[in-house]
Amino acid sequence: MCEVNNLLRALKKFDTSIVSDALDKLGMKGAVAGLLQLTVRRRIAGRVVTVKLRPPLADEAPTRHLGTGAVVAASANDIIVVEHGGRMDCAGWGGLLARGAARKNMGGIIVDGAVRDVDECAALGMPVFARGATPMTARGRAIEHSFNEPICIAGLSVFPGDLVLADGTGVVFLPVVEAARILEVANQLFNREEALGREIDSGRPLDAVMNAKYEDMLKREVDS
């Protein structure tokens, strides 16, 4: 756990664009498009706790509401990630769940689909990322298939214990076994972009700063 905490501290230094670039440079997938920052404007990074939803079968009656098991099992600063298949016809998260997550000081919620009670989640200070909002309940429309099992977010496999970073630009996932290598490359790219930013601020022409060398920054390491 100490190693994961160190990785998360390092991860919080970066934004999702830099980490996405690092993934590109390493030939890895992890960036997800279309997951929007719906509540508080704050960068979040944490360990993934997964939830998988599905449509209910005929006359199927769940014994508990979706997401509750994951909230109970999660630790402070964990981030719940919900596979909801991109559905916009019903919410994969809501206000009462957010209250439970807030009481445990969780880091945030990411849903591949719609959520509801956005104003309530914002008032709680709970970061929520999703494809959009809807007032329509999940009851009778979606149930929990499992939690803390592998899930699929927009075609990307995500596993419990993976790391996730989310901000106003989007969401990126890092397999925990590859996180140190990804962060090392992200740090190199971050330092290069900081240097380029200083050149722009100093008055150097933009086309001289963002030249062919800039275009080659993300060439795969095996090619360099």
Image (tube, helix red, strand yellow):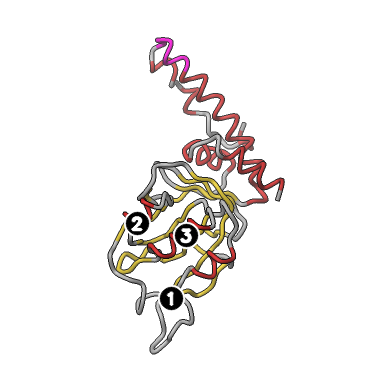
Image position, residue 46 (x, y; %): 56, 49
Q: Amino acid at mark 1?
A: Ile
Residue 206 part of the magenta-drawn span = no
Q: Amino acid at mark 2?
A: Glu
Question: Which numbered circle lies on residue 131?
Answer: none
Q: Badge 2 is on which residue? A: 120
Image position, residue 50 (x, y; %): 54, 63
- Tag 3 or tag 1, which sits nearer the N-term? 1
Left or right, 49 with reference to 131: right
Q: Residues within 10 Å of mark 1 (few under 14, many from 20)?
A: many
Question: Which numbered circle lies on residue 143?
Answer: 1
**Disc 1 vs disc 3: which is toward the camera?**
1
Q: Residue drawn at (56%, 51%), measured in percent from left and top? A: 77
Q: Is residue 165 above or below residue 224?
A: below
Assign a secondary structure to mark 3: strand
Give the CA distance from mark 1 to mark 3: 17 Å
**Disc 1 vs disc 2: which is toward the camera?**
2
Give the CA distance from mark 1 to mark 2: 22 Å
Q: Residue pushed farthest top?
A: 203
**Disc 3 vs disc 2: which is toward the camera?**
2
Give the CA distance from mark 3 to mark 2: 25 Å
Q: Badge 3 is on which residue? A: 153
Q: Residue drawn at (53%, 53%), measured in percent from left and top? A: 105
Q: Nearer the viewer, residue 169 or 79?
A: 79
Q: Is residue 131 above or below residue 214?
A: below
Q: Which residues are magenta?
A: 198-204
Q: Is residue 62 above or below residue 99?
A: below
Assign a secondary structure to mark 2: helix
- Tag 2 or tag 1, which sits nearer the N-term? 2
